[in-house]
Amino acid sequence: MSDHDCKNHHHPCHKKEVANLNRISGQIEGVKKMIEERRYCPETLTQLRAIRSAIKSIELRILDVHLSSCVSQASLSSDQNEQKRKIDEIRDLIKRFE
């Protein structure tokens, strides 16, 4: 089974991101504790920046898989409406990432 396959063959699998999300969850708990302990602001901000960076990395990996699987499959399809929907979808995603 490849990274793009899961039980639902219509959508790629992102199961490997669960471990990364669990790590981020732990980082968030750590920041909450830092705030409760009234830790030095720059230390807290540094941890928050690390969380943002980790989330951005997950977003980019999922987007990459989406482009290489879902969008790629649509581009090979003879259904021009499906191709247009995927292109419009990518445009919307890019707008939201700004």
Image (spheres, rainbow, N blue to C red):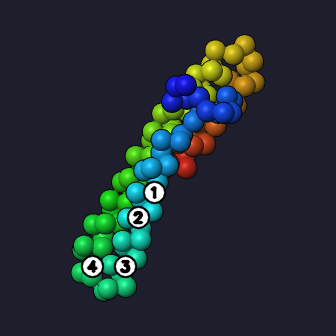
Say left or right for 85 vs 44: right
For the N terminus, give its image quadrant. Answer: top right
> Residues under labels 1 and 4: Cα distance?
24 Å
Question: Residue 52: x percent and y percent?
Answer: 39, 58
Which of the two discs, 3 and 2, labels the residue nearer the N terminus? 2
Which of the two discs, 3 and 1, labels the residue nearer the N terminus? 1
Which of the two discs, 1 and 4, labels the residue nearer the N terminus? 1
Q: Which mark, residue 96?
A: none
> Residues under labels 3 and 1: Cα distance?
17 Å
The residue identified by callout 1 is 22
Question: Residue 98: x percent and y percent?
Answer: 48, 50
Say left or right for 7 vs 72: right
Q: Say if 79 sits above or below 51 in the image.
A: above
> Residues under labels 2 and 4: Cα distance?
19 Å
The residue identified by callout 3 is 33
Q: Which mark, residue 41?
A: 4
Label 2–label 4 contact, CB within 8 A? no
Label 1–label 2 contact, CB within 8 A? yes
Q: Amino acid at mark 1?
A: Asn
Q: Residue at x 51, y 30 (%)?
A: 3
Label 3–label 1 contact, CB within 8 A? no
> Residues under labels 3 and 2: Cα distance?
11 Å
Categorize mark 4 by other alpha carbons within 10 Å: few (<14), some (14-19), many (20+): few
**Number of numbered discs overlaid on the protein picture:** 4
Q: Amino acid at mark 3?
A: Lys
Q: Secondary structure at mark 3?
A: helix
Question: Residue 9: x percent and y percent?
Answer: 67, 28
Q: Amino acid at mark 4?
A: Cys
Q: Say if 92 sits above or below 11 in the image.
A: below
Please say whether residue 64 is visible from this viewpoint. yes
Q: Say if 24 sits above or below 69 in the image.
A: below
Q: Residue at x 48, y 41 (%)?
A: 16
